[in-house]
Amino acid sequence: MKLFFDTSALIKKYILENGSDKVENLMNQADIIFVSVITEMETYSTFRRLLIKKAINEDDYKILLNEFEIDCQFYTHIDFNEIISVNAKLLIEKYQLKTIDSIQLGTALLLKDQIDYVVVSDEKIIKSGKTEGLKVINPMNIK
């Protein structure tokens, strides 16, 4: 199975929350996990925000960064390019997505014929992705 993971779902591998077990199962079933090149920055930002909010401590923060860096080697990173830029601008126009979300979804659209599913937990991206014809899995809704 070939999956594209948005950061909203990928983060559940590292932070225990609703859908974390489903993300782990999907990852174990995947032959290829695609991520946008911006996923690294988004993930770092999320971990840092959790540290600042004191939801995790400094040791947890370092462990999470290390785990993520190790796993990152096994993800297939899709670089930002002109097609993604065009896709993102169109998605902003159609759905009023945030910049980062439009890049994530624009990347998924670039890969539409190469992936089986987009794994995402953000409701606005889910709705927009489905409207764009993507097969979407929300790990919080898997039974």
Image (cartoon, rainbow, N blue to C red):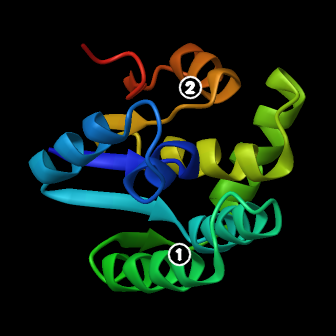
Label 1 sits on a secondary structure element that is helix
Residue 23, percent from left and from top: 31, 42
Q: Residue at x 12, y 56 (%)?
A: 31
Label 2 sits on a secondary structure element that is helix
Q: Residue at x 62, y 30 (%)?
A: 122
Identity of the amino acid at label 2?
A: Gly
Q: Quadrant of residue 14?
A: bottom left
Residue 107, percent from left and from top: 56, 52
- State whether residue 74 appears in this view: yes
Q: Is residue 35 above or below residue 65?
A: above
- Residue that label 2 marks: 129
- Residue that label 1 marks: 60
Residue 79, percent from left and from top: 56, 74
Front one among 17 and 97:
17
Identity of the amino acid at label 1?
A: Asp
**Quarter holding the N terminus?**
top left
Q: Residue at x 43, y 76 (%)?
A: 68
Q: Residue at x 44, y 26 (%)?
A: 134
